[in-house]
Image: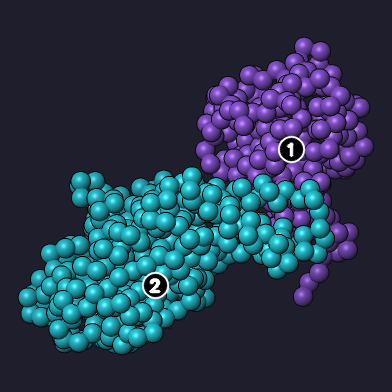
Amino acid sequence: MLIEEISLDRFRNYPSLHVEPVPGVNILVGDNAQGKSNLLEAIYMLATTKSFRTVRDTEVIQSGQSQSRASATVRQSDGSSARIALTLGRSEQKHASINAASTERAVDLLGVLRAVVFAAQDLRLITGEPSCRRRHMDLALAQTSLPYLQDLGAYKRILLQRNKLLKSLRERWSANSGLDAWTSQLVRYGIGLLLHRRDFVQEMSELAGQSHRELSDGAEDLSVHYHPNPSLQADDGPELAKERYEEALQRVAEEELRRGTTLAGPQRDDLRFAINGLEARVYGSQGQQRTVVLSIKLAELDYIEAVSGEEPVLLLDDVMSDLDDQRRRRLLRRLSGRCQTFITCTNLRGFPDEILSQAGLFRVEAGRIERFCL
Amino acid sequence: MLHHAKPLARLIGELGKLPGIGPKSAQRMAYHILRSSASDVQALAEALLEVKERIRFCAECFNFSEEETCSVCRDPRRNAHVVCVVAEPRDIMAIERTQEYRGLYHVLQGLVSPRDGIMPEMLRVRELLQRIATRGIEEVIVATNPTVEGDTTALYLAKLLKPVGVRVTLLAHGLPVGAELDYADPATLSSALQYRREL
Ligand SMILES: Nc1ncnc2c1ncn2[C@@H]1O[C@H](COP(=O)(O)OP(=O)(O)OP(=O)(O)O)[C@@H](O)[C@H]1O
Ligand SMILES: [Mg+2]
Ligand SMILES: [Zn+2]
């Protein structure tokens, strides 16, 4: 898929903006704090309705303004095109429209535009809390699977309700509290998440391994491991997964009542990354960790393409800084001729001539963007 | 800062407690009432008091009713062996619009939601069990909204009613996930009733 045109209105430091990117590589160059990452953020929000930089989406509304709007024309590989728009207000409400028809919920936007982002804070995928890794799985899967998105929404709500219930039961016990019904619901939606995530990571591990071998020129072997809660076997189907989840909840039942919170389930899942068998979080160098994240993001790109039959848009925020010349060159080689890509940087050094001669070059300065030629 | 005269502020305060009415709308409504004729305001005030005085809950099904029991429960042509369980009286209106259903109702007056402090014992569940035990009810159709809370309530009831020995069915999934019965069009709702599934 391709973004043919994107417009912003009162979004971060852009009072208003209209850009027409090229189908291949788009390079956004500018000094610090000019708005390069802000543009990538807008594209990502049109794809997922969420920011990749903040969990408080209202931060994107320009200071002093009450609402913010991003819109784009997206062309699919079959030639059809759609105009999508997302409007955000101060009280967190979001409105989406597709071809001028407003959608019931903002998440209906998902799947029209798909994007994979690589940004500085993505290093948290390795060094951060398990929740960073779960969020990463959720964002990739939500873009490719509507059932996953629905299961995720339901699961989060059930979890919240069940936790509230456990908390109130800790204060005042009641035999007729409906806890069993909430537990059945938790299991019903939880196994959907577990099985989706397991299959996703299985494919990701394969794809990320390939990317990582290329980027490290065969020197490094990357593997990704899913640590589900409850633990699953590689070939467990829904029936077995249900049994395992029920057993796990059974085991912690008393403890849950003591602590007043749910103690088993995919809200406690994690991922591990290993380079040549050594855990990347503990033993990886800065550059290695960056390469791992990059490999995972490239794998996500391959995955989304394989599942949806459409190449997502790739957003690379400041990706060049921590990579050595070799890895940088290999990355660009791997990308050339593939999907529409947006790369931000502070200068054009380090880009090979064959990339620069074909790329769309844009100068970003204080909330304005202008195309230029060398 | 300018303040509203006391009676006006009071009216705005009361109107602002209504669902979906923010401070601005409350103010607009209050100004409108001030400008209206004394007889219109009188009629409005009487209607408010009357609804509170005359409308109560049906002693059988907990629908709104003017009498001890509601018009559905009193109607001898209805099939008294089937009871359709709904969350709110407005859901009865939605199902009646389909003209498909000829049984009785039971209004739970809510759905389980620990987040809002609503536990099963706060719903009209005991009364439902009582009705089943004493009124010869053979089938219970659980018609709660297909939301997380609606489904969980249905699941809770199904487990509770299983040992009782009545047939328990759920509305078929003709309804879109997250839909409100209240907003479902009659055709969708009537096919959901027709194709309800056994638990
Ligand atoms: N809600 C907002 N309203 C107005 N301006 C904002 C808002 N949020 C961020 N900004 C401004 O946007 C600028 C940052 O833009 P951005 O993060 O895109 O920079 P950048 O070009 O990517 O810089 P760097 O090279 O440092 O990453 C800052 O000047 C910041 O003050
Ligand atoms: Mg930046
Ligand atoms: Zn009645």
Image coordinates of residue A76 in percent, x first then y, are 24, 50
**Crowding near pointer 1: few (<14 within 10 Å), some, many (20+)?**
some
Please give the label number shown on residue A333: none
- Judge from the rendering whether residue B2 lies leftward or rightward of residue A371; answer left or right: right
Q: Amino acid at mark 2?
A: Arg
Image coordinates of residue A333 in percent, x first then y, are 13, 73
Please give the label number shown on residue A272: 2
Residue named by callout 1? B160
Image coordinates of residue B100 in percent, x first then y, are 63, 19
When the figure is inspected, residue A44 is found, relative to residue A194, above or below; the finding is below
Q: Amino acid at mark 1?
A: Leu
Which chain is drawn using cyan? A
Which chain is drawn using purple? B
When the figure is inspected, residue A305 is found, relative to residue A373, above or below; the finding is above
Q: Nearer the viewer, residue B41 or B13?
A: B13
When the figure is inspected, residue B107 is found, relative to residue A201, above or below; the finding is above
